[in-house]
Amino acid sequence: MNAVEISGVTKAYPDVTDGGEGGMRNVLEAVDLTLGEGERIAVVGPSGSGKSTLLNIMGTLDRPDAGSMKLFGEDYGGADERRLARVRGQEIGFIFQLHHLLPQCSVLENVLVPTLALKPKPDPAGTRERALALLERVGLQDHAGKRPAQLSGGERQRVAVVRALINEPRLLLADEPTGALDEESAAKLTELLVDLNEERKVSVVMVTHDSRLAEKIGKTYRLRHGKLEVA
Ligand SMILES: Nc1ncnc2c1ncn2[C@@H]1O[C@H](COP(=O)(O)OP(=O)(O)OP(=O)(O)O)[C@@H](O)[C@H]1O
Ligand SMILES: [Mg+2]
């Protein structure tokens, strides 16, 4: 089974470089991508090349203008918002460049946020146990009661990783997760994603500017002029 199957995906936005003529520009042009379950890939490309657009389409945060998009063998092309929200909440974990942790909540509370939307409601004791085990896995067992402001940048991103994994998704989408980190923390976070992919068989897509980090992930695609090619 494939985690993601994208075929002929096209996405256009209003062209701001045409002097207000009202034209459109294809950010993605007939992009095909297959990601096997348990596979991990990196996506690189210049700023504005459509990396986030592609990731957001894979994550059902955005819809393609044309083409088809399947997740875990199911077509989400014409899916209504309810179906999209369900697959997004249960099967997909997101990590962004900025951690978006809630400043007034503890690390543990932040990690539990994605479980609040689950229906039926999961058993709170089991969820808490899973959160603490994941925090321990990323070396943050002693930080569960702290607030995000009391952590380093790398630690905050590890909290974001745990939050992304709390619902045991089958697909982890990371958009420049190391963008705000120093070199050493960036390398460590990337290695953590590789290890989690191998341990949990969660499929991983990591967008990055840094070709050395892409190399750590392994198979790398490059987006350029709307086309996706193997790098
Ligand atoms: N909602 C939107 N409305 C109009 N244009 C958009 C929108 N979202 C993205 N774009 C345009 O689409 C192009 C691709 O954007 P995208 O964010 O996918 O690039 P990116 O490769 O992620 O860039 P970066 O590396 O800077 O994050 C850019 O030119 C951007 O201005
Ligand atoms: Mg981006």
Image (tube, rainbow, N blue to C red):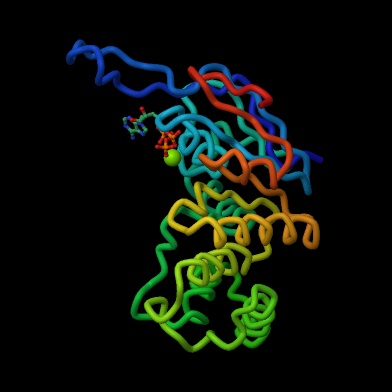
Quadrant location of the C terminus in the rendered image? top right
Task: Please provide percent x and percent y for residue 166.
Answer: 62, 69
**Is residue 92 shown above or below 52?**
below
2 on left or right of 186: right
**Is residue 33 shown above or below 196?**
above
Residue at 75% x, 60% y is 195
Residue at 61% x, 53% y is 92
Task: Please provide percent x and percent y for residue 27.
Answer: 44, 23
**Is residue 145 shown above or below 36?**
below
Q: Nearer the viewer, residue 209 or 10?
A: 209
Residue at 47% x, 58% y is 181
**Location of residue 69 by image quarter:** top right
118 on left or right of 24: right
**Is residue 209 shown above or below 33?**
below
Quadrant location of the N terminus in the rendered image? top right
Residue at 58% x, 75% y is 121
Report ligand 1 position as a quadrant.
top left
Q: How many marks?
A: 0
**Location of residue 91 by image quarter:** bottom right
Q: Nearer the viewer, residue 116 or 5?
A: 5
Q: Nearer the viewer, residue 216 or 7?
A: 216
Q: Nearer the viewer, residue 223 or 181?
A: 181
Task: Please provide percent x and percent y for residue 107.
Answer: 49, 80
Task: Please provide percent x and percent y for residue 189.
Answer: 60, 60
